[in-house]
Image (spheres, grey):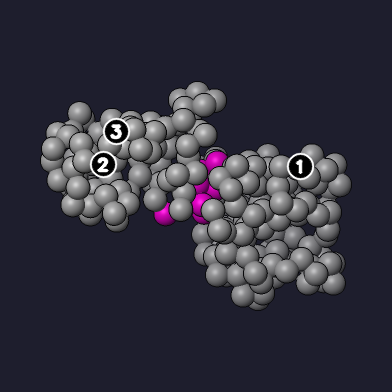
């Protein structure tokens, strides 16, 4: 995946986002002021840096302006969370997701420019990573360590074809469980029915083939 992301804050949520994005093939810059947290992710992400958001010079050297998106996963310090969000937006990052600890925090983050605010009890780090990695995946469930169940928008090149013609099981290694049309879930869809461009599919796929869907 030809995308680059930065993650500020490597607590449970931030680690989850950074790891999932790295597993999806993205370039990931992980930042935290805790050297142990940084060291723990050094072999997982593209680059892990120990830095304080309050250190202006250190921040400017990170090259945040080149990122497709930034995740601000800091909640232990309200000031640091706000500063990281402002810094990312002023650097010209097109999309900033910020984690919030409560409703008041959420309002502040939106005021200072966060494009999306997530609450940890409402959205997991993995879900946030999937949202960033691709617009294709609408939702997903971990069936096991190796098997995922996803709801995806159909790819543009699939529209106008039938499931039989596409042979998604053989070519893409995915199993189509159902198709969602006009909000209705159609289980065991007709393999000879032509797919409309506005459909979504419920599928299962092995984790090792996820990269095929993230393009």
Residue at x 48%, y 40% (from the top left corner): 210
Residue at x 78%, y 72% (from the top left corner): 60
Mark 1–mark 3 Cα distance, whole angstroms, equals: 35 Å
Q: Is residue 180 above or below residue 188?
A: below
Q: Which residues are the magenta region?
A: 125-135
Q: Do the residues bearing badges 1 and 2 touch, measured as CB atoms within 8 Å?
A: no
> Is residue 111 visible in this depiction of the protein?
no
Mark 2–mark 3 Cα distance, whole angstroms, equals: 11 Å
Q: Residue furthest top?
A: 144
Q: Do the residues bearing badges 2 and 3 touch, measured as CB atoms within 8 Å?
A: no
Frontmost of labels 2 and 3 is 2
Mark 1–mark 2 Cα distance, whole angstroms, equals: 38 Å
Residue 108 falls in image quadrant: bottom right
Q: Is residue 26 above or below residue 142?
A: below
Give the residue at mark 2.
166
Give whichever of discs 1 and 2 has the lower sequence position. Answer: 1
Q: Is residue 126 magenta?
A: yes
Q: Main secondary structure of the magenta part?
A: helix
Classify residue 141 as left or right of residue 164.
right
Residue at x 57%, y 64% (from the top left corner): 68
Residue 5 horizontal/vertical position (percent): 62, 58
Judged from the image, the secondary structure of the residue bearing numbered disc 3 is strand
Residue 93 horizontal/vertical position (percent): 60, 70
Q: Do the residues bearing badges 1 and 3 touch, measured as CB atoms within 8 Å?
A: no
**In-front residue for pair 167/126:** 167
Residue 190 horizontal/vertical position (percent): 14, 34
Give the residue at mark 3.
176
Judged from the image, the secondary structure of the residue bearing numbered disc 2 is helix
Give the residue at mark 1.
43
- What mark, if any, has residue 129 been given in the picture? none
Label 1 crowd bin: few (<14), some (14–19), many (20+), radius 10 Å: few
């Amino acid at each position: 995946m030809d995308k680059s992301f930065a993650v500020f804050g490597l607590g449970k949520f931030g680690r989850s986002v950074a790891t999932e994005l790295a597993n999806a093939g993205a370039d990931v810059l992980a930042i935290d002021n805790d050297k142990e947290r940084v060291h723990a992710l050094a072999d997982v992400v593209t680059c892990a840096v120990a830095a304080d958001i309050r250190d202006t010079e250190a921040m400017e050297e990170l090259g945040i302006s080149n990122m497709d998106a930034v995740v601000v996963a800091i909640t232990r310090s309200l000031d640091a969370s706000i500063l990281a969000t402002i810094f990312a937006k002023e650097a010209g990052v097109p999309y900033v997701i910020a984690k919030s600890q409560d409703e008041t925090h959420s309002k502040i983050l939106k005021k200072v420019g966060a494009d999306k605010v997530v609450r940890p009890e409402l959205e997991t780090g993995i879900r946030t990573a999937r949202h960033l990695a691709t617009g294709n995946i609408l939702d997903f469930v971990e069936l096991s360590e190796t098997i995922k169940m996803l709801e995806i928008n159909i790819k543009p090149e699939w529209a106008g074809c039938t499931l039989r013609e596409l042979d998604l099981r053989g070519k893409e290694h995915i199993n189509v469980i159902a198709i969602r049309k006009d909000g209705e879930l159609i289980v065991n869809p007709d393999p000879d029915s032509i797919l409309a461009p506005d459909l979504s599919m419920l599928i299962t796929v092995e984790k090792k083939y996820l990269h095929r869907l993230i393009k």
